[in-house]
Image (spheres, rainbow, N blue to C red):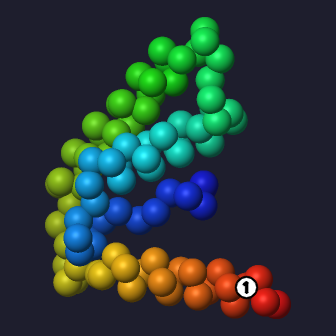
């Protein structure tokens, strides 16, 4: 899976539509194997992003958390620390 797609469920603050759309875009880019589609493929690319965005949003709205929300800033900081440790090796 693409490293740029972040977990979006059960965070405080909650994921925004922009967060969900960015993850959908990264997913479609990964599947298509291209960052920017050709003119002929633009419509199919944009439709896929919108469908995945809508589906992901419905899923996130339907999920039920069994634990307290995690702090998004702390989560991102821990991720950066793990990355720095891995780079130092």
Which picture quadrant has residue 70?
A: bottom left
Relative vertical location of residue 85 with respect to residue 51 in this rendering, above or below: below
| Residue 2 place in picture, x, y as percent | 60, 55
**Split into 4 quadrants, where in the image is the N terminus?**
bottom right
Q: What secondary structure is marked by label 1?
A: helix
| Residue 36 place in picture, x, y as percent | 62, 29
Which picture quadrant has residue 53?
A: top left
Residue position for label 1: 86
Q: What residue is drawn where x is 42% and y is 81%?
A: 75
Query: Which residue is situated farthest in the right direction here?
Result: 89
Relative vertical location of residue 9 with respect to residue 28 in this rendering, above or below: below
Q: Is residue 43 visible?
A: yes
Q: Is residue 56 left or right of residue 3?
A: left
Q: What residue is drawn where x is 68% and y is 85%?
A: 84
The number of numbered discs placed on residues in the rendered structure image is 1
Relative vertical location of residue 34 with respect to residue 40 in this rendering, above or below: below
Query: 76 or 53: which is nearer to us?
Result: 76
Query: Which residue is situated farthest in the top direction here?
Result: 40
Q: Is residue 77 left or right of residue 72?
A: right
Q: What residue is drawn where x is 28% and y is 60%?
A: 15
Q: Is residue 31 visible?
A: no
| Residue 49 place in picture, x, y as percent | 43, 32
Q: Residues within 10 Å of mark 1 (few under 14, many from 20)?
A: few
Query: 58 or 3: which is nearer to us?
Result: 3
Query: 22 or 55: which is nearer to us?
Result: 22
**Split into 4 quadrants, where in the image is the C terminus?**
bottom right
Q: What residue is drawn where x is 48% and y is 84%?
A: 77
Q: Is residue 48 left or right of residue 1?
A: left
């Amino acid at each position: 899976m693409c490293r740029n797609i972040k977990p979006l469920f059960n965070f405080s603050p909650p994921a925004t539509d922009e967060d969900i759309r960015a993850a959908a875009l990264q997913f479609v880019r990964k599947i298509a194997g291209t960052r920017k589609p050709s003119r002929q493929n633009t419509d199919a690319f944009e439709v896929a992003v919108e469908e995945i965005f809508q589906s992901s949003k419905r899923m996130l709205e339907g999920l039920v958390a069994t634990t307290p929300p995690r702090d998004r800033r702390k989560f991102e900081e821990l991720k950066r620390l793990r990355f720095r440790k891995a780079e130092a090796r």
